């Protein structure tokens, strides 16, 4: 209860006109920044940070918090409309969002995404409010061995994306792991596959890689497969359906998305708390879990449940990531690290004492998340009718526009042409792969998860001097391992059972 | 069409004249041979925005601007992180034109990977100043809810590093964590002094000290290497206990309880100072180098800088260009020698 009293005190601070203004500004900027591919929350917060040095710390963190937060909404726009994830947490949103938009339901896809973000985020913030510092302790319980198993669980989601040809799926997953291993080995500092090129010492940057594989590959496909008359028909078809009323969710749709939102909301919050895993892991785990539940349409073909699971997961994780940041001074993600730098710049000492020494600051931040959440939802819903018109733009105009967006996004990750080069190369490779029946989604997931898995597993082995026992010596690890084994073995056991049954019935006949 | 072409060539010519005038650097060095900037200054920081190096860079540029030390020119901080920072460093090392207007934040943590992975050496830069020095300590987390390491499980005393050394010698594995770069070098020096191998006392590398402290708080490490600033809050809250000063003398304040290595056994003290400095292209003119060294000296004297040092618990150790160059050269030689050894 004490937490809620503090929260209300926080609201009083936030409802100061200056702070409301800062919150709104942050929310709108976050939405815009999130919608632009390449410029994720990390770049957004980093760019705005110097501007906020003149503010008082509470106003500054309210603005940056709102920006970070609303960013998770914006990422879904380009993912659904253009199949270019606005930022990395939206990769899984694109998997179902874009097919759904293609089916003529772009408005509903966007509304579903934003509503899921809102509810998922609210769940995250509520959990954050109630448990605050307790939540951070949960994160600490996860050592390398636990994280290794969590990541193995997350990796099982790759198998669902592999598609019809398992061999091709495995090949592409391996390719993702191989590309991810380029650059400096984080544990020993030894360069891998750099071929004497100093750019490659830093590895393949993720954002340009994704923009290329997904976005630019799309452009090449459009150029190659464009047929003028088809295009015309297509755009006419679209026009009919793109109305505001058509964007509203029907009761049936709402009932479809609610369970995945609730599941992903809770799960995402905890994923956000875990060390080193941010919103991206949140949406991936949420999406992977949804695969285990029934969806009305198969996942990956435009199932609204997939959008909901992914978007609720990333917003909840974004909220969860604030727990270790505020309670322990531990950034849960790259963006968290930048926020932490900001805290120090404002003269605050982030760490275990922050809640005690600067309660006003902490609680204002948490209450501003509520405000930012409501505000972003309103803005997002209002601009959806405008945004869906993008889809009725003829392909011949879309090609140069998307190309520009891809270039700008790739450039802005490190403000250099290196990103653009990566984007073009991975775009061409992505197109060729897709054309030959290799799905690119497993490659992207492997690219994100494999380095984290490698790092945690190697740390576990260093800590235990190479003993496998470190993965089974506590109840938490055993439970996680059991979940992993159930996930992996269920299909195997099922197929064996089916065979046994089959032979039994044959024998009976 | 012809008209257009003419216009185009005319405007091109105009642009070239303007840019030539801007590059005609003669005007920024006066008859007394003194440099005074007449253009914007670019300051490359090879770490991402918001981190320690970035704050260091922005603080210095802010002081230069506020104290009107740079002739009212704008300083643009540019975070160039490609190739783990090597691209930005190489750009400065090989820069020929505009060398007087480019600065680089250059730390010990930048030098070591650079020397390891590229052909660039400290000599390829002009070292303008060392602005601050930092030292490290070993900390431990007694209060972790669950200790997961072999040493702690075997009942080892986490607050006594001397006991940990004995345990390691007798076959109990002790694990230390820290960030990449500076901390690894210190760990290696410590290991060498103790005569242990990494199979007796292992090291886990983290992306940042913050991550390493997180691991220690979770009971995943026996000891964590950190600079005072990053650990300060945790010491105050009782979550971390300082156990060994990696320094030739004890620290002060709430870190005073940690003994140095020579106090706990028959060892030499291990101290690997971590420095933060400013460099420039080797091609920078002598006049400009003198100018920048002076400006940095004035920054080091300013109140705002003293405040920054205090907030980050850095040791005030300004070294002007000559002394700094020697210092960095020695540091590099030491490092290369330790690599061979």
Image: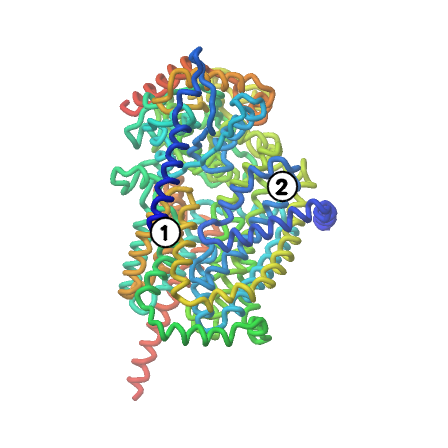
Same-chain status of marks 2 and 1: yes
**Would you say A68 lies left or right of A442 here?**
right
- Please identify the residue farthest to the bottom as the structure is shown: A509
A101 vs A117: above or below: below
Where in the figure is residue A11, as x and y percent of width and height?
A: 72, 49
**Would you say A204 lies left or right of B318 here?**
left
**Image point 41% across, 62% down: which residue?**
A398
Name the secondary structure under disc 2: helix
Disc 2 chain ID: A
Q: Residues within 10 Å of mark 1 (few under 14, many from 20)?
A: many
Name the secondary structure under disc 1: helix
Residue B105 seen in render: yes
Where in the figure is residue B182, as x and y percent of width and height?
A: 41, 28
* Number of marks present in the image shown: 2
**Image point 44% across, 10% down: which residue?**
B32
Residue B242 seen in render: no
A358 vs B324: above or below: below
The C terminus of chain A - image quarter: bottom left
**Image point 32% across, 40% down: which residue?**
A199
B21 vs B204: above or below: above
Residue under numbered circle 2? A60
Of the pair B91 and A487, the residue shown nearer to us: B91
Residue under numbered circle 1? A209
**Would you say B331 lies left or right of B256 here?**
left
Where in the figure is residue A98, as x and y percent of width and height?
A: 44, 66
Quarter of the image for residue A399 reads bottom left
Quarter of the image for residue A344 reads top right
Q: Residues within 10 Å of mark 2 (few under 14, many from 20)?
A: many
Q: Looking at the image, tell me whether mark 2 or mark 1 is earlier in sequence order.
A: 2
Of the pair B32 and A242, the residue shown nearer to us: B32
**Would you say A208 lies left or right of B157 here?**
left
């Amino acid at each position: 209860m004490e937490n809620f009293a503090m929260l209300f005190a926080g609201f009083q601070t936030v409802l100061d006109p200056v702070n409301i203004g800062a919150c709104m500004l942050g929310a709108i900027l976050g939405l815009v920044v999130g919608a632009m591919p390449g410029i994720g929350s990390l770049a957004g917060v980093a760019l705005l940070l110097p501007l906020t040095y003149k503010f008082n710390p509470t106003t500054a963190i309210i603005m940056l918090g709102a920006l970070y937060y609303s960013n998770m909404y914006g990422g879904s726009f380009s993912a659904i409309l253009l199949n270019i994830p606005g930022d990395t947490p939206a990769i899984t949103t694109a998997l179902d969002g874009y097919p759904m938009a293609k089916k003529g339901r772009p408005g509903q896809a966007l509304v579903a995404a934003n509503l899921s973000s809102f509810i998922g985020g609210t769940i995250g913030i509520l959990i954050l409010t109630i448990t605050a510092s307790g939540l951070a302790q949960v994160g600490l319980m996860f050592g390398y061995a636990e994280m290794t198993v969590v990541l193995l669980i997350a990796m099982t989601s790759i198998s669902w994306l592999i598609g019809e040809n398992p061999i091709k799926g495995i090949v592409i997953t391996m390719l993702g792991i191989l590309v991810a291993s380029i650059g400096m080995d984080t544990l020993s500092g030894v360069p891998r596959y750099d071929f004497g090129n100093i750019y490659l010492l830093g590895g393949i940057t993720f954002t340009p890689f994704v923009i290329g594989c997904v976005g630019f590959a799309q452009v090449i496909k459009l150029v190659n497969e464009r047929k003028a008359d088809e295009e015309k028909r297509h755009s006419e078809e679209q026009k009919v359906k793109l109305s505001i009323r058509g964007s509203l969710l029907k009761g049936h749709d709402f009932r479809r998305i609610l369970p995945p939102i609730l599941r992903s909301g809770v799960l995402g919050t905890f994923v956000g708390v875990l060390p080193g895993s941010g919103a991206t892991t949140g949406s991936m785990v949420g999406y992977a879990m949804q695969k285990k539940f029934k969806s009305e349409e198969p996942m990956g073909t435009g199932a609204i449940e997939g959008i909901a699971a992914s978007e609720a997961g990333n917003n909840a994780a974004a909220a969860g990531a604030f727990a270790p940041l505020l309670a322990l001074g531990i950034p849960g993600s790259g963006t968290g690290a930048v926020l932490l730098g900001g805290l120090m710049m404002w003269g605050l000492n982030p760490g275990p004492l922050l809640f005690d020494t600067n309660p006003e600051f902490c609680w204002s931040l948490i209450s501003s998340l509520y405000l930012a959440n409501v505000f972003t939802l309103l803005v997002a819903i209002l601009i959806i009718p405008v945004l869906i018109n993008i889809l009725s733009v003829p392909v011949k105009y879309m090609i140069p526009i998307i190309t520009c967006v891809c270039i700008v996004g790739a450039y802005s990750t490190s403000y250099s042409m290196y990103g653009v080069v990566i984007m073009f190369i991975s775009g061409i490779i992505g197109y060729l792969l897709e054309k030959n029946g290799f799905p690119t989604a497993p490659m992207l997931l492997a690219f994100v998860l494999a380095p984290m898995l490698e790092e945690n597993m190697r740390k576990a082995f260093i800590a235990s001097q190479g003993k496998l026992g470190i993965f089974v010596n506590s109840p938490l690890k055993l439970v996680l391992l059991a979940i992993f084994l159930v996930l992996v073995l269920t299909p195997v056991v099922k197929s064996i059972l089916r065979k046994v049954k089959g032979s039994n019935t044959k024998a009976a006949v | 069409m012809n008209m257009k072409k003419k216009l185009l060539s005319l405007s091109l010519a105009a642009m070239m004249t303007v840019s030539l005038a801007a590059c005609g650097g003669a005007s920024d060095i006066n008859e007394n041979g003194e440099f005074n900037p007449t253009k914007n200054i670019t300051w490359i920081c090879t770490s991402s925005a918001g981190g320690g190096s970035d704050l260091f860079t922005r603080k210095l540029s802010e002081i230069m601007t506020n104290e009107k030390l740079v002739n009212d020119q704008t300083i643009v901080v540019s975070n160039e992180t490609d190739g783990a920072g090597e691209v930005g460093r190489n750009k400065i090392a090989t820069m020929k034109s505009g060398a007087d207007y480019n600065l680089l934040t250059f730390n010990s943590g930048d030098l070591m990977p650079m020397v390891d992975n590229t052909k660039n050496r400290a000599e390829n830069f002009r070292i303008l100043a060392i602005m601050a020095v930092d030292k490290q300590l070993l900390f431990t987390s007694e209060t972790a809810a669950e200790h997961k390491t072999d040493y702690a499980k075997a009942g080892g005393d986490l607050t006594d590093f001397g006991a940990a050394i004995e345990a390691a010698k007798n076959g109990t594995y002790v694990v230390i964590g820290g960030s990449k770069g500076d901390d690894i070098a210190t760990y290696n020096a410590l290991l060498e002094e103790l005569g242990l191998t990494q199979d007796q006392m292992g090291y886990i590398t983290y992306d940042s000290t913050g991550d390493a402290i997180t691991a220690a708080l979770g009971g995943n490490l026996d000891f964590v290497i950190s600079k005072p600033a990053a650990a300060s809050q945790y010491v105050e809250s009782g979550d971390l206990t300082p156990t060994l000063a990696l320094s030739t003398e004890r620290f002060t304040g709430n870190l005073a309880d940690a003994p140095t290595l020579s106090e706990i056994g028959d060892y030499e003290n291990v101290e690997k100072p971590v420095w933060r400095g400013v460099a420039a292209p080797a091609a920078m003119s002598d006049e400009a180098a003198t100018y920048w060294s002076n400006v940095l000296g004035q920054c080091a004297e300013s109140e705002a800088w003293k405040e920054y040092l205090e907030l980050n618990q850095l040791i005030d150790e300004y070294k002007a260009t000559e002394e700094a160059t020697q210092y960095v050269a020695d540091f590099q030689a030491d490092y290369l020698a330790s690599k061979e050894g």
